[in-house]
Amino acid sequence: KQPFMQTILSMLTIYAFGVAAAFTYTHLMAIVTQGTLKHLRVDMFDKMQSLPIKYFDTHAHGDIMSTYTNDTDAIRMMVSQSMPMLVQSILTILVMIIMMTRFSIPMFIVVCLFVAGMLTVTKKFGGMSSRYMMFQQRSLAAEEGFVEEMMAGQKVVQVFCHEEEAKRDFLKY
């Protein structure tokens, strides 16, 4: 009876530490994410303040705003989700390496070969997809810039009967 109660107490203690660690980890990541994004937005605003007027004349308002919204949101997703997952994955891999080397060196070598293959394939497809991601962000910025300009100048478009031309231009985007 005594060992059973000790086991239950040990499990409760481990779960309590796990919950406390998860809470602390989540809280710290929220602080890091918000702080990073605040500095990024301040830096972007400061940079925008130093740009010449010509920049604003040659770039659509929606294109500039897209940088503030979509690109910043993509960075937020990376900082708040991808980075913590990376840290967690690295810790998991380290623990698994230690456990595998303690139990079976041949199995560890087989796993390393498979991991090397997976990394090679991931690097190849990741490199190819990053090119398309950049293209998608640029085209989204251009499209949002066009829509912003059309919405801001909606009365002018209607007065000069350019609705159909605006629709054709939008289809190009």
Image (cartoon, rainbow, N blue to C red):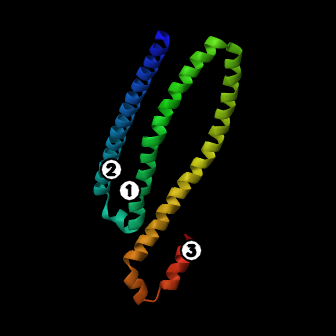
User: Along the polypeptide, which appears first: circle 2 or circle 1?
Assistant: 2
* Label 3 secondary element: helix
Q: CA distance from mark 3 to mark 1?
A: 24 Å
Under mark 1, the amino acid is Tyr
- Distance from disc 3 to disc 2, alpha carbons, whole Å, reads 32 Å
Q: Tell me if I can see residue 59 in this picture.
A: no
In front here: 87 or 164? 87
| Amino acid type of the residue tagged 3 in the rendering | Leu
The local secondary structure at tag 2 comes to helix
Residue drawn 54% across and 69% down?
A: 173
Residue 104: quarter of image: top right
**Residue 62 rendering spot, x and y as whole percentages:** 41, 66
Viewer can see residue 36: yes
- Judge whether 102 appears above or below 68 on screen: above
Residue beneath label 2, please? 41
**Direction from residue 87 to residue 44 in the image, left or right:** left
- Residue 110 percent location from the top left of the image: 71, 22
**Residue at x 39%, y 28% (from the top left corner):** 21
Whether tag 2 and tag 1 are in contact, CB under 8 A, the answer is yes
Residue 152 x %, y %: 37, 75
Q: Earlier in the sequence, mark 3 or mark 1?
A: 1
- Residue 149 drawn above or below residue 85: below
Give the CA separation, mark 2 to mark 1: 8 Å
Q: Position of residue 26 (x, y in %)?
A: 39, 36
Q: Quarter-wise, where is residue 59 in the image?
A: bottom left
Identify the residue shown where x is 33% and y is 39%. Answer: 31
Which residue position holds label 1?
A: 68
| Residue at image coords 46%, 43% | 78
Q: Residues within 10 Å of mark 1 (few under 14, many from 20)?
A: some
Q: Amino acid at mark 2?
A: Arg
Cβ atoms under marks 3 and 1 closer than 8 Å: no
Q: Which residue is mark 3?
A: 171
